[in-house]
């Protein structure tokens, strides 16, 4: 599936980098990494991008981007849409931080 998608995009001659919002693609090893590897094999750059992740989610995306696309600066600029940060402090952000111990447990599977 990934190879066909990349090949279709490459043949369209419209695409510059491949922009990836990882939460939509699912498994890192089975889908995301394969998609990035297929794009790279065809000479396309891939950019990991955020889609309304909290500071905690952005931290994870930054780590994934460092692993999968170390040569590319990720697009992780959605924190300004939030009023607070969650669990982890994002570098140079002045938004207040809510720690894990401050969160209210709403539901728990027993």
Image (spheres, helix red, strand yellow):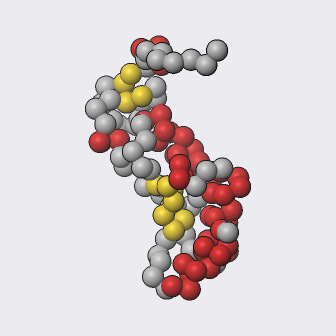
Residue 95 in the image: above or below residue 81:
above
Q: Horizontal and vertical percent for residue 51? A: 42, 49
Residue in the image at 36% along x and 46% along y: 78
Q: In the figure, residue 8 lies in which quadrant?
A: bottom right
Residue 58, percent across and down? 46, 41
Determine whether 41 is above or below 98 in the image: below
Position of the C terminus by quadrant: top right
Q: Is residue 57 above or below residue 44?
A: above
| Whether residue 39 is visible | yes
Q: Quadrant of residue 84?
A: top left
The quarter of the picture where the N terminus appears is bottom right
- Image point 38% across, 21% down: which residue? 98
Q: Residue 41 placed where, x, y %? A: 67, 74
Relative to 51, is 68 on the left or the right?
Answer: right
Residue 43 makes an appearance in the image: no
47 shown above or below 81? below
- Answer with left or right where residue 39 lies relative to residue 48: right
């Amino acid at each position: 599936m990934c190879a066909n998608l990349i090949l279709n995009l490459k043949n369209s001659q419209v695409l510059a980098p491949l922009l990836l919002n990882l939460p939509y693609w699912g498994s890192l090893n089975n889908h995301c990494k394969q998609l990035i590897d297929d794009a790279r094999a065809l000479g396309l750059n891939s950019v990991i991008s955020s889609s309304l992740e909290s500071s905690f989610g952005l931290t994870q995306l930054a780590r994934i981007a460092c692993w999968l696309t170390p040569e590319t600066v990720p697009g992780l600029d959605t924190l300004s849409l939030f009023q607070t940060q969650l669990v982890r402090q994002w570098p140079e952000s002045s938004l207040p931080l809510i720690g894990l111990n401050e969160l209210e447990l709403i539901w728990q599977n027993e």
